[in-house]
Amino acid sequence: MCLESWYDLQLDEVEVLILNLSASNYTLPLFMEKMRKLKVLIIVNHGRTKAKLRNLITHSEFANLKRIKLEKVSIPSLHEFAMPLKNLQKLSLFMCDFGQVLMKFTIKISSMLPNLVEINIDYCHDLVELPPWICGIINLQTLSITNCDNLSALTERIGDIANLEFLRLHGCSGLLKLPDSINGLQKLRFLHISDCCNLKMLPDGMGELHCLKKLDMRGCIVLSELPPSAMNLVNLMEVICDEDTIASLWEPLSSTLTIIELKKDNNLDWLGVDI
């Protein structure tokens, strides 16, 4: 719907808004300016191409948002927002385009998103490297990047996310290694690198992750050795890996470590027919 098609709705009490659209360009309705209690914004594009959002700069009520989910849209530059998203806690991006605008973002992000604790990025295929500004979100606790097959590098600044507790890098087949600066994640408790099928090595400083309790390494088929420092992970309680691949590498810690070997399931019963 074009801007002129919207009625002047009075939605003062609305806390959740879900917009389902099918367009390459989409102008957010002006009635959103009156939604002072809006806490959750979900925008889902069902069109064939990514939707470009417009009319963001006028929405000062975005300052009250706690959660934003965008699906199949071109991520707008944070420069377009009228004020910091001081209450935003969770940001989810599915099948979105980042573009160079977000990669070159320069505003001090700690004041722009002071309470953001969780970022989920899924199936964003133009994501080649982790935007450095994400590492400036000082209160970030969860960072999940899944099925971004063109992601080839994490910024060396990732160690600056001092409060990060959960890091998931699932299905990122273009990722060849993790940066040495990961040893700065002193509060990290869960590390998931499952199905990073081209990950060749783990960083030498991995043994400095003294709070690490769980490591998921399923599908890391080319990873054949661990850095010597991995034996210093004295608080590591559980490693999940494929059968007959990585399990033997952790045997020196087998007395204190639970190693879960997942067998390949070749059962075809899920087809629902007799073979």
Image (cartoon, rainbow, N blue to C red):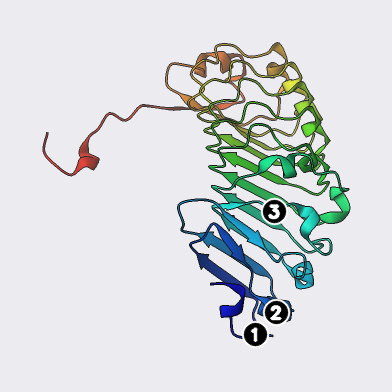
Residue tagged by mark 1? 11
Q: Nearer the viewer, residue 151 or 78?
A: 78
Which residue lies under the disc numbered 3?
A: 76
Residue 223 occupies which quadrant of the picture?
A: top right
Horizontal side of residue 43 vs 270, given as left or right: right
First in residue order: circle 3 vs circle 1: 1
- Bin the neighbour count of mark 3 within 10 Å (Cα to Cα): few under 14, some 14-19, many 20 and up: some
| CA neighbours of label 1 inside 10 A, class few (<14), some (14 to 19), many (20+) | some
- Give percent across and percent down for residue 79: 80, 54
Residue shown at 63%/14% (left/top)? 226
Residue 159 at x, y = what percent?
80, 32
Label 2 environment density (alpha carbons within 10 Å; few <14, some 14–19, many ≥20): many
Where 102 sits versus 36, above or below?
above
Q: Quadrant of the C terminus?
A: top left
Q: Looking at numbered disc 1 in the image, what kind of residue is underneath it? A: Leu
Q: Amino acid at mark 2?
A: Met
Q: CA distance from mark 2 to mark 1?
A: 6 Å
Can you tell which of label 3 and label 2 is closer to the viewer? 3
Nearest the camera: 148 or 209? 148
Q: Position of residue 132 (x, y in %)?
A: 78, 37
Residue that mark 2 sits on: 35
Q: Are marks 2 and 1 in contact (CB under 8 Å)?
A: yes
Nearest to N terminus: mark 3 or mark 2 = 2
